[in-house]
Amino acid sequence: MTETTYHHGDLKNALIQAGVEILAAEGLGGLSLRKVAKQAGVSHAAPYSHFADKQALIAAISTEGFKQLYVQIEEILKSYRDNPQRLLIETAWAYLQFALNEPDRFKLMFSSVLDKEKDYPDFVEASQENFAQLVSIVELCQQGGVLKSGSADVVAVSTWSTVHGFAALLIEGQISHAVLERTSLKELLVQIL
C-alpha cells in the first residue's frame, strides 16, 4: 500500500496487513511501527493510535492469523463432519497450506516473540479458540475410530505436534528433495497422520 492507495477506513487492519507484508519481505527483524506506517502510507505516528508498541503489533498480526486459520478449519469441519478420516486429513492439509502460504506469520504465531501474551486478551482468546476447535475435531475423529482414544486434548497436542513439526521441517527446507520428488506433500502428510 502507498499513500495513494490508503484512504479512510480501517487503519488498524491496513497496518496489520502492512506488517504481514513486511514480515514476508524482511522477516521479524525488519518489522517496526515506523516501517508499517510507511508501508501503509500513513504518518509514522499513526500506528500508535492502535498499537502501543511493536509487541502490540505482533499480537495483532498473530491474532488475525489465528482468526484466519480458524475460519479455514471451520469450513473443513462443516464439510467433513460426517467423514472423520477426511476431516483429519483435510484439517491437517489446511494447516500445512496456511504454514506454507504465510511462513513468517506462521512462525510468529507459534513463537515466543510475544512477551507477556496475557496482556493481549484477543490473542489469548483466538489461540484458545483454535485449540478448542482442534479438540472438537479430535473428538469426532476418535468417535469415528480414526484417532486413538484417550483425553482429547492430549491427543490433540500429539496430532498437532506431528503436523506442526512437518510444517516446520518443510518451511526450513529440511525434508529430503529425493523424498519430495517422488511423493506429494499430501501423501507425506497422510503417512505421518
Image (cartoon, rainbow, N blue to C red):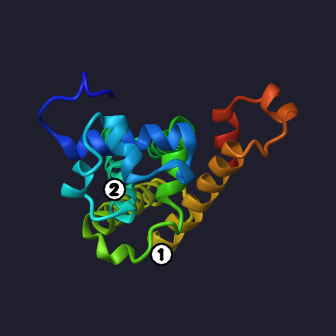
Can you give x and y, in whole percent of width and height, for residue 185 in the image?
A: 67, 34
Q: Residue at x 45, y 71 (%)?
A: 153
Where disc 1 sits, the SS reads loop
Regarding residue 162, the answer to whether it shows in the image is yes
Q: Nearer the viewer, residue 58 or 80?
A: 58
Q: Using the numbered discs, state the Cα–Cα distance from disc 2 to disc 1 in whole angstroms.
A: 27 Å
Which one is in front in this view, the residue at disc 2 or the one at disc 1? 2
Regarding residue 72, the answer to whether it shows in the image is no
Can you give x and y, in whole percent of width and height, for residue 158 in the image?
A: 59, 66
Which is more N-terminal, label 1 or label 2?
2
Q: Quadrant of the N terminus?
A: top left
> From the viewer's perspective, is residue 130 above or below residue 121?
above
Disc 1 marks a residue whose amino acid type is Ser
Disc 2 marks a residue whose amino acid type is Thr
Q: Nearer the viewer, residue 84 or 22?
A: 22
Q: Nearer the viewer, residue 124 or 56?
A: 56
Q: Residues within 10 Å of mark 2 (few under 14, many from 20)?
A: many
Please report contact status of discs 2 and 1: CB closer than 8 Å, yes or no: no
Q: Residue at x 32, y 38 (%)?
A: 75
Q: Residue at x 84, y 33 (%)?
A: 177
62 lies left or right of 193: left
Q: How many discs mark residues in the rendered view?
A: 2
Can you give x and y, in whole percent of width and height, for residue 40 in the image?
A: 31, 36
> From the viewer's perspective, is residue 98 above or below residue 58?
above
Q: Which residue is mark 1?
A: 151
Q: Which residue is mark 2?
A: 63
